[in-house]
Image: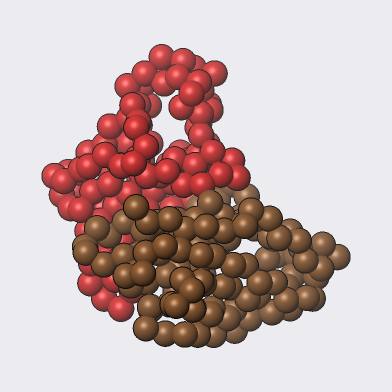
Amino acid sequence: EADIYQTPRYLVIGTGKKITLECSQTMGHDKMYWYQQDPGMELHLIHYSYGVNSTEKGDLSSESTVSRIRTEHFPLTLESARPSHTSQYLCASSDSTGPRTDTQYFGPGTRLTVL
Amino acid sequence: GEDVEQSLFLSVREGDSSVINCTYTDSSSTYLYWYKQEPGAGLQLLTYIFSNMDMKQDQRLTVLLNKKDKHLSLRIADTQTGDSAIYFCAEMGPGGSYIPTFGRGTSLIVHP
């Protein structure tokens, strides 16, 4: 039902590398979110966006940055990856209008391992 | 701030009913959601309920909402091994924050 995509699905990278995790949605949703989730653990909101050129930091402090230049695209960048960044990263989007207002739809996630 | 609590684990036998419980603190919640997460995947929306409803049924799923006690439950009838996953409860408050509060998830284990 929800068309939200994340690439790559899995990434193993060395310490100090710059990485960008991609998230795209084709539903025209105005709001997008990034969550960090350790295995079997709760979700932590790290970034969100209410629309183009709008980005905010979430509850969990993160060394990552995001941008929202286009409605459908919300990439997350780590300038210098560290082993502590090893986690699953989930992207989500939601819509302010329609019958399921504000319901979040999630992508499949990116599993990041930093060696 | 808002808080959503769930028990961490539930084990049931295949064919039995599963009941996953959730409590929340925000009495002004407008929407309450249940998501399912299978290993290595994102969260899949299972169902949601408006805060002015008491019950919602969708095939094998029944959601019960007790606003007085701020208690939400998800009942899965005839539980199958494919139902094994982590189930997240979430609530959305009013006020336009657009950010739901998630519980920590309940790991449902279905055994033969």
Q: Is residue B31 above or below residue A21?
A: below
* Colour pattern of the rendering: by chain
* Residue sticking out furthest to the right: B112
Horizontal side of residue A7 vs A79, given as left or right: right
Q: Is residue A105 above or below residue A12?
A: below
Q: Position of residue B102 (x, y in %)?
A: 45, 56
Closest to the observer, A40 or A91: A40
Q: Is residue A78 above or below residue B27?
A: above
Q: Position of residue B68 (x, y in %)?
A: 44, 77
Colour of the chain lettered B: brown
Q: Position of residue A68 (x, y in %)?
A: 20, 44
Task: Name the residue at 66% across, 72% down.
Answer: B19
Task: Name the residue at 42% across, 70% down.
Answer: B32
Report which quarter residue A95 is drawn in: bottom left
Colour of the chain lettered A: red
Quadrant, the C terminus of chain A: top right
